[in-house]
Amino acid sequence: MNRINTEGQVMIGLGVRAANGALEILDLPSPRQPDAGELVLQVVAAGIGPWDALLHTGGWDVGLVPPAALGVEAVGRVIATGPDETEFRTGDLVVVHEAPLPGGSGTWAERVLVRSAHVARLPDNLAPEIAAALPVAGLTAQQALDELHVDSTTRLLVVGASGPTASLAVQLAHIRGAEIVAGAGPARADQLRALGASEVIDTHADGWAQRSDRRFDAVLIAATGTAEDAIGLLTDGGRLTSITSDAPDPIRGITTSNLYVQPDGRALGELAALAASGELRLDVQTTPIKDGAAIADQVAGGRSGGVKYVLEF
């Protein structure tokens, strides 16, 4: 058991004093000492995503106990391990998606308590700010493709493909050998083709689904309000998964589902290796914690322009 005892110390975090309170920089208590299967991380970088707005409002219950920091993904250095920890040691640089939060406070803070099963060691050649952008978006994309049974025989439509999660889904589906059509605005068409899409449909245009003569085996919905149109482009017995919680009722033997991401350290390690090799790309911008509240508001309002923002500590 390796420990740097920070319990009782004060740390800086970006979070809320009460449920649905104002997002602000706070003095917070450091995490307790880790139990078996837990680690304390000194946070280096932490991702900001639209899902953090759900933490803020209570729409996603991750066990937040205010006053607390928000955030469910980070890169950090292990500074304490629980009893009998064999996989990680103090000093290891790791990446994590954590939910629910075992310490009641999130990753937008100098230190955070996490479960070791949800952690992956960072490849030496992967920048922390890139890795911190990866966990929720990458795991969501990977798990959605698994739900859709995407492989080299699949004709896949990704609707809302310009965002970080869906753009990773395009890249991961390309790695699997699928035929991918991306639904997005025309401004992102060249970028999506470079990521692996064979065609880009302007899903911002009225009647886009009705005008398409394409048919697909699987549809991934990453833009609210598009699922009812997109289901009409599926073959009988096809599959639709939504990451925006609005999957329509099944018709024509089509399977529909909503996907809610689950932490998975092993899968996160695989994604980190792909990012380190250059097979996965993300458009990342960093921001200091003092500007984090404004950036979080921008991301929650859908004004990030496809960029994934990361807090640096």
Image: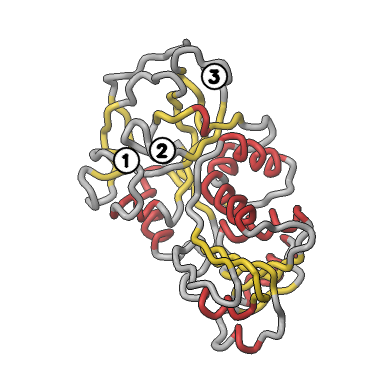
Q: Look at 45% across and 68% down and name the residue there.
A: 246
**Most extreme residue toward the front, as rendered?**
253
Q: How is the image coloured?
A: secondary structure
- Label 1 amino acid? Gly
Sooner in the amino-acid sequence: mark 2 or mark 1: 1
Question: Which numbered marker is on residue 107?
Answer: 2
- Give the number of callouts: 3
- Which percent across, then down, holds residue 278? 73, 46
Q: Residues within 10 Å of mark 2 (few under 14, many from 20)?
A: many
Label 1, secondary structure: give it. loop
Label 2, secondary structure: give it. loop
Q: Look at 74% across and 41% down and name the residue there.
A: 277
- Which percent across, then down, holds residue 9? 29, 21
- Front-most of residues 70 and 256: 256
Q: Which residue is mark 1?
A: 63
Q: Is residue 30 left or right of residue 136?
A: left
- Report if the CB atoms under discs 2 and 1 are less than 8 Å apart: no
Q: Which residue is mark 3?
A: 91
Q: Residues within 10 Å of mark 1 (few under 14, many from 20)?
A: some
Q: Look at 63% across and 53% down and name the residue there.
A: 146
Q: Residues within 10 Å of mark 3 (few under 14, many from 20)?
A: some
Q: CA distance from mark 2 to mark 1?
A: 13 Å
Q: Look at 58% across and 32% down and name the residue there.
A: 120
- Label 3 amino acid? Gly
- Front-most of residues 236 and 226: 236
- Label 2 amino acid? Thr
